Amino acid sequence: AQSVTQLGSHVSVSEGALVLLRCNYSSSVPPYLFWYVQYPNQGLQLLLKYTTGATLVKGINGFEAEFKKSETSFHLTKPSAHMSDAAEYFCAVSSKVGKLIFGQGTELSVKP
Amino acid sequence: DAGVIQSPRHEVTEMGQEVTLRCKPISGHDYLFWYRQTMMRGLELLIYFNNNVPIDDSGMPEDRFSAKMPNASFSTLKIQPSEPRDSAVYFCASSFSRHGQETQYFGPGTRLLVL
């Protein structure tokens, strides 16, 4: 069975500071990993995904994530937060079967 | 492309009424997913279709929920009768093929409130 744990339901950073959102997964097969972002009253939008190959994945809006198999982690980072990054972020895992399993989400607040 | 289209965007109804949510997937996509989002349970996959055929409905909460996909460009999720605990945001998503790695594209959601 697959599962995703996002550490911290709410993260607050200052504008310009490093953003780090944590995600750990459990999967009995090689996972496909995703980060989605949800802005208020909108649907989910893909930020980035890891399928195979390079473990450091770059996404939109300056975000990136690193797949660490030994740590079963896929943390999301951004060097410098912007006010427009305030949103809810979801980590998700999928297998070849294709079902997306989402974490509970992390709400990111950015202080001026 | 217009993206995934859902209607209505908001629905307020009374307990016991029938509710029908609609979804138009992205043209050319052959997988369609229905999700429900609540504060308590997060994002849950309810059902998904491949080439208009339901593949996995294990997430459908109970018999009051039903979903259909009569053609490649339209799907409905119906709740009959509705109950207050069905209040949630319902998302439709679509993707092209499904080997697990394809991006799912989400619609804006339907916010349902059952009084």
Image: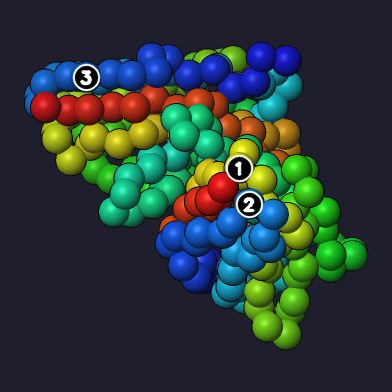
Is B27 situated above or below B111? above
Q: Quadrant of the N terminus of chain B?
A: top right
User: Label 1: few (<14), some or many (≥20) within 10 Å?
Assistant: some
Is A85 or A6 nearer to us in this picture?
Answer: A85
Quick check: marks 3 and 1 in contact, CB under 8 Å?
A: no
Chain for disc number 3:
B
Q: Residue furthest front?
A: A112
Q: Are marks 3 and 1 on the same chain?
A: no
Q: Which residue is mark 1?
A: A83
> How far across and how far down the image is residue A71, in percent?
68, 83
| Residue at image point 50% right, 26% down | B108
* C-alpha distance separating marks 3 and 2: 38 Å
Q: Which residue is mark 2?
A: A15
Is B92 situated above or below A97? above
Q: Report whether A57 appears left or right of A7.
A: right
The mark closer to the camera, 3 or 1, is: 1
Label 1: element kind: helix
> How far across and how far down the image is residue A23, in percent?
59, 68
Is B13 or B56 nearer to us in this picture?
Answer: B13
Q: Which residue is mark 3?
A: B12
Label 3: element kind: strand
Q: Quadrant of residue B41?
A: bottom left
Quick check: marks 1 and 2 in contact, CB under 8 Å?
A: yes
Q: Report whether B19 appears left or right of B22.
A: left
* C-alpha distance separating marks 1 and 2: 6 Å
> How far across and how far down the image is residue A49, in percent?
74, 53
Q: Amino acid at mark 1?
A: Met
> How far across and how far down the image is residue A26, in percent?
57, 74
Is A58 or B96 nearer to us in this picture?
Answer: A58
Total numbered labels placed on residues in the image: 3
